[in-house]
Image (tube, rainbow, N blue to C red):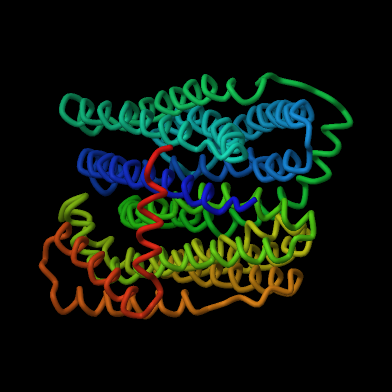
């Protein structure tokens, strides 16, 4: 059975939903930054980043473990048993990690505002951890429309609440954080309501099942911890050693990066079960096909994003957050290069799980994390956000290269680079065209960039008209 049309349809639905979520997210950033200003946005960034670190510890690889273990089971009851036990583990890990996180934060050299903010937003972190697991259920069923709807409702609720805060309670950081926590609570309720259609959701504690889960998850957990050491400790070290203003500028640039990369985990969550299934069955032809198609898809997205942001970064920052944040434009130009590693490299990182090479990759994550952490601690106090950005990009590139090395060696895949090279060339043409024809208007430049990129792809043969027609057909609801 060819599942790629179903994957493509789910991918298109996710992209459509994510585009809307991105637009809402951008509007939310605009309201928050213009309401708080650079310094208070630095405090906001410190709070969010700290809880993101705690959130990674809460996950401990359970999300990917759930997808992998349930894919191995044929019976619905066995799948439900795994999900219920993982949900129990998630709640326990959340309680422990959040409690320790709040205690540790109280002894860090943060302002009282930041410490109280961490307590408030811890509820959001708990809800987000539950959302991750519930999302995995819908990914396995290829029913991502429920996740998309819940996220859109959450984003709209948050946006309208921010509008009210902006006009009636400006510069109120606590209200913004409370609203965020409530919005994630709404998301959980909506996902639970829809999730009951596919699985019996309840808590369970089976010792044998728990042992199986933990035995599978521990390499992932260690890898995830190492991963956060080079992904999130840049802002953490920055918040401890530099001014709130500098944290605010870097945090805004990083937030745009986060928004742009929101699609990658969801897209990979759809493909991962398919790759796992074919790998376990020894179906190399099918495994190679889906890996190659996914590689092509991520290449087509990553390169034009980099080219477009390099030209339009000042327009993006000014249009969203105003002239007060224009210092973030060059930081964004630097950080955007991480998109290549996060998109294209992310495919290999997820595939590592599908081919059961987590333990091998763990050493790569560990080495990279320790080197990154050491260089963050040494260079950030001296060079600030420039050091943070450069070290982050280098770390991401190392992980991406190592991931592909392991995947290609173990799977014996001969990757076809034709689409990737053509998309890179098309992105270069787009970037040059934008630079030459720059309208000094963000929306006009976005439209112009899309047109140039698609024309260049067609001219280079990376896309064909029949593929565009097939894409159109996939958008039609059956």
User: Picture quarter containing residue 197?
Assistant: top right
State left or right for residue 155 relative to residue 299: left
Q: Is residue 106 visible?
A: yes
Residue at 54% over, 32% down: 131
Count every numbered label the image shows and give the total.
Answer: 0
On screen, residue 201 above or below 260 = above
State left or right for residue 421 relative to residue 101: left
User: Picture quarter containing residue 170?
Assistant: top left
On screen, residue 193 above or below 105 = above
Which image quadrant: the C terminus? Answer: top left
For this orientation, the residue located farthest to the right is 208
Q: Where is residue 12 shown, x and y percent of the image?
A: 42, 49
Q: Where is residue 117 shown, x and y percent of the image?
A: 42, 32
Residue at 33% over, 65% down: 331
Q: Is residue 243 visible?
A: no
State left or right for residue 54 relative to residue 467: right
In depth, the one of 46 and 312 nearer the eye is 312
In depth, the one of 26 and 478 nearer the eye is 478
Q: Where is residue 169 shown, x and y percent of the image?
A: 21, 26
Residue at 41% over, 23% down: 182
Q: Where is residue 382 shown, x and y percent of the image?
A: 43, 69
Residue at 34% over, 57% down: 253
User: Picture quarter containing residue 91?
Assistant: top right
């Amino acid at each position: 059975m060819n599942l790629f049309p179903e994957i493509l349809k789910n991918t298109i639905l996710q992209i459509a939903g994510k585009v809307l979520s991105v637009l809402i997210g951008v509007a939310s950033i605009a309201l928050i930054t213009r309401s708080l200003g650079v310094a208070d946005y630095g405090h906001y960034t410190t709070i969010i980043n700290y809880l993101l670190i705690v959130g990674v510890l809460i996950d401990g690889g359970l999300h990917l473990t759930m997808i992998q273990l349930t894919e191995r089971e044929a019976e619905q009851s066995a799948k439900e048993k795994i999900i219920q036990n993982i949900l129990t583990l998630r709640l326990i890990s959340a309680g422990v990690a959040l409690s320790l996180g709040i205690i540790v934060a109280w002894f860090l050299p943060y302002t009282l505002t930041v410490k109280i903010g961490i307590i408030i937003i811890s509820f959001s972190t708990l809800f987000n951890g539950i959302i991750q697991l519930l999302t995995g259920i819908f990914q396995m069923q290829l029913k991502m429309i429920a996740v998309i709807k819940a996220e859109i409702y959450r984003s709209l609720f948050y946006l309208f609440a921010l509008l009210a805060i902006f006009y009636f309670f400006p510069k109120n950081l606590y209200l913004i954080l409370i609203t965020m926590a409530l919005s994630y609570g709404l998301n959980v309720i909506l996902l639970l309501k829809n999730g009951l259609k596919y699985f019996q959701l309840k808590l369970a504690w089976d010792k044998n099942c728990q042992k199986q889960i933990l035995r599978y998850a521990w390499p992932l957990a260690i890898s995830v911890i190492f991963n956060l050491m080079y992904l999130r400790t840049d802002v953490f070290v920055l918040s401890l050693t530099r001014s709130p203003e500098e944290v605010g500028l870097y945090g805004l640039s990083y937030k745009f990066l986060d928004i742009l990369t929101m699609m990658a985990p969801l897209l990979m969550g759809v493909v991962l079960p398919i790759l796992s299934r074919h790998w376990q069955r020894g179906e190399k032809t099918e495994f190679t096909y889906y890996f190659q198609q996914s590689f092509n898809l991520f290449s087509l997205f990553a390169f034009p994003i980099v080219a477009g942001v390099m030209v339009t970064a000042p327009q993006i920052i000014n249009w969203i957050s105003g002239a007060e944040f224009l210092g973030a434009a060059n930081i964004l130009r630097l950080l955007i290069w991480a998109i290549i590693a996060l998109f294209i490299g992310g495919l290999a990182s997820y595939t590592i799980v599908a081919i059961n090479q987590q333990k091998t990759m763990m050493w790569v994550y560990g080495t990279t994390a320790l080197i990154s952490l050491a260089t963050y601690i040494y260079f950030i106090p001296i060079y600030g956000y420039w050091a943070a950005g450069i070290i982050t990009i280098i770390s991401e590139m190392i992980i991406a290269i190592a991931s592909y090395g392991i995947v290609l060696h173990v799977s014996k895949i001969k990757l076809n680079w034709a689409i990737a090279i053509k998309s890179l060339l098309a992105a270069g043409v787009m970037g040059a065209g934008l630079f030459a024809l720059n309208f000094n208007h963000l929306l006009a430049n976005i439209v112009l960039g899309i047109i140039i990129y698609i024309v260049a792809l067609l001219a280079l043969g990376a896309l064909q008209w029949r593929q565009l027609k097939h894409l159109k057909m996939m958008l039609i609801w059956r």
